[in-house]
């Protein structure tokens, strides 16, 4: 029983995901081993309306909140992390765009119809030379005006879910305006290609390849965003799909380790290793960390969804990401200590969880930025306090 499922709608969506549990779990090892993008999994989520679930009801979607998304993404990640992280970006981008009304009404209406018809979208902002866009680097991808259209050239890295994306929401530097703009690029535009560069040990099935733009021409209306602040400068709780994913991985690792401890019976003992104090210590520490991380992420998500309290949030989104992802790494490590050397066998899911969970450390926002923001906030608060 999920203690954080509060409404009938949440339970209904959870059941839809649990109906996919066996199939997703069965394919997870092959997806990882062969670095296969889980197209069938994604299509099954499209078929049940999951990919349009964060679209507001007014636009024909399910109107799921950040809290709802966290609940569902955590569950999905416990089945298959690659599927969860891949689709999480689409859910988060759609949720943010419509909540914040980042585009014109016409562009939002257009995207809503596309998403309802199964279109998938992700932002493409990272570049090899600039690193994470949250650090404020200027994109090397350029956009120039020519004959009433925009022409884009450049290369983006970490384009998660690239094989099935319909739209790439791509950042580029507009020299004549001296600012960054985001352009909506359809996958079939001439000059737009995907170069299969994703060769990593974590999240191998996310197909986070390079997006290559070679003089890609798009109509003027496809310049859909001109952000006032650098990426990461505004509060965006839809990014909580990231720690939710790694929380799900940690839960899967914990569940495997506990089951192993209850069933592994070496002949040196009269029963399973779960009776050993050191094993119980590790199990207790895993559940302690899970409980702490889970209450943090759900309390912040709930606060964000409450518009009367949202303005009180400042650094909490980064704190959640930092706390949950680091806790998840520790939890998987403890699970492997319980299982022992068997956890290193390629046929054992723990070695996959161990590799996948570390990817969370490199998703935005980065740990050092979160700590720095907390420090600066504390210093500023003290400076503004009238104390003797």
Image (cartoon, rainbow, N blue to C red):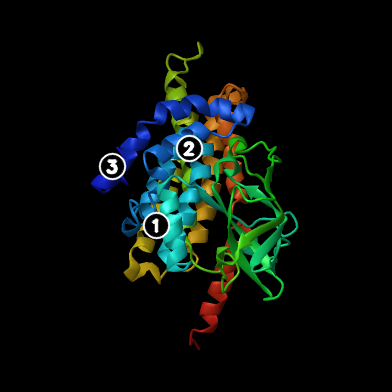
Mark sitting earlier along the chain (2/3): 3
Number of the label disc, if any, that sits on residue 301: 1
Q: Please tell me whether residue 377 is drawn above or below residue 163 in the rendered image.
A: below
| Quarter of the view holding residue 1 | top left
Residue 11 is tagged as 3
Q: Position of residue 302 (x, y in %)?
A: 35, 58
Percent position of residue 184, x then y: 57, 58
Q: Secondary structure at mark 3?
A: helix
Q: Is residue 80 left or right of residue 356?
A: left
Please report the residue visible at 63 percent of the width from the left and 38 percent of the height from the top. Answer: 202
The numbered mark, 1 or 2, whose residue comes first in the sequence reads 2
Secondary element under disc 1, as helix, strand or loop, is helix
- Look at the numbered discs 2 and 3 and tell me whether their residues touch, using CB distance below 8 Å: no
- The image quadrant that residue 183 belongs to is bottom right
Q: What is the spatial separation of the Cα atoms under label 1 and label 2, in whole angstroms?
A: 25 Å
**Which of 5/382 is in front?**
5
- Crowd tier of the residue under label 3, counting other residues whose Cα lies within 10 Å: few below 14, some 14–19, many 20 or above: some
Q: Please, is residue 30 above or below residue 83 in the view?
A: above
Residue 205 shows up from this direction: yes
Q: Is residue 94 above or below residue 358?
A: below
Using the numbered discs, state the Cα–Cα distance from disc 1 to disc 3 in whole angstroms. Answer: 17 Å
Position in image of residue 326 (x %, y %):
55, 48
Q: Earlier in the sequence, mark 1 or mark 3?
A: 3
In the rendered structure, the answer to whether residue 169 lies left or right of residue 201 reads: left
Q: Nearer the viewer, residue 74 or 332?
A: 74
Residue behind mark 2: 42
**Crowd band around label 1 with a 10 angstrom C-alpha radius: few (<14), some (14–19), many (20+):** many
Residue farthest toward the top in the current orientation of the protein: 267
């Amino acid at each position: 029983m999920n203690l954080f499922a509060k409404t009938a709608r949440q339970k209904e969506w959870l059941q839809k995901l649990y109906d996919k549990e066996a199939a997703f779990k069965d394919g997870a090892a092959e997806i990882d081993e062969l670095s296969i993008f889980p197209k069938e999994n994604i299509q099954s989520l499209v078929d049940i309306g999951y990919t349009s679930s964060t679209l507001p009801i007014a636009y024909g979607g399910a109107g799921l909140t950040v809290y709802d998304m966290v609940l569902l993404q955590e569950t999905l990640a416990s089945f298959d992390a690659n599927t969860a992280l891949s689709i999480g970006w689409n859910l988060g981008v759609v949720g943010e765009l419509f909540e914040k009304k980042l585009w014109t009404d016409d562009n939002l209406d257009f995207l809503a119809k596309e998403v309802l018809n199964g279109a998938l979208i992700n932002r493409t902002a990272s570049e090899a030379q600039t690193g994470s866009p949250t650090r404020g680097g200027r994109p090397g991808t350029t956009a120039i005006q020519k004959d009433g259209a925009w022409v884009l050239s450049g290369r983006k890295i970490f384009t998660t879910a690239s094989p099935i994306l319909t739209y790439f929401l791509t950042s580029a530097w507009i020299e004549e305006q001296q600012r960054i703009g985001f352009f909506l690029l359809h996958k079939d535009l001439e000059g737009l290609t995907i170069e299969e560069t994703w060769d990593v040990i974590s999240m191998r099935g996310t197909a986070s390849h390079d997006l290559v733009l070679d003089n890609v021409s798009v109509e003027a209306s496809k310049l859909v965003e001109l952000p006032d602040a650098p990426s990461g400068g505004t509060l965006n709780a839809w990014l909580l799909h990231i720690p939710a994913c790694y929380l799900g991985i940690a839960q899967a690792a914990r569940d495997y380790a506990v089951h192993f401890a209850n069933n592994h019976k070496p002949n040196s003992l009269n029963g399973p290793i779960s009776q050993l104090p050191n094993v119980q210590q590790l199990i207790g520490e895993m559940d302690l960390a899970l409980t702490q991380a889970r209450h943090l992420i759900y309390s912040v998500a709930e606060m964000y969804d409450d518009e009367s309290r949202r303005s009180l949030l400042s650094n909490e989104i980064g704190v959640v990401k930092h706390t949950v992802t680091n806790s998840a790494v520790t939890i998987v490590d403890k699970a492997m200590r319980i299982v022992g050397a068997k956890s290193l066998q390629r046929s054992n899911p723990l070695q996959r969880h161990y590799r996948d969970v570390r990817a969370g450390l490199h998703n935005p926002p980065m740990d050092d930025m979160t700590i720095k923001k907390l420090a600066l906030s504390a210093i500023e608060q003290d400076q503004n306090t009238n104390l003797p």
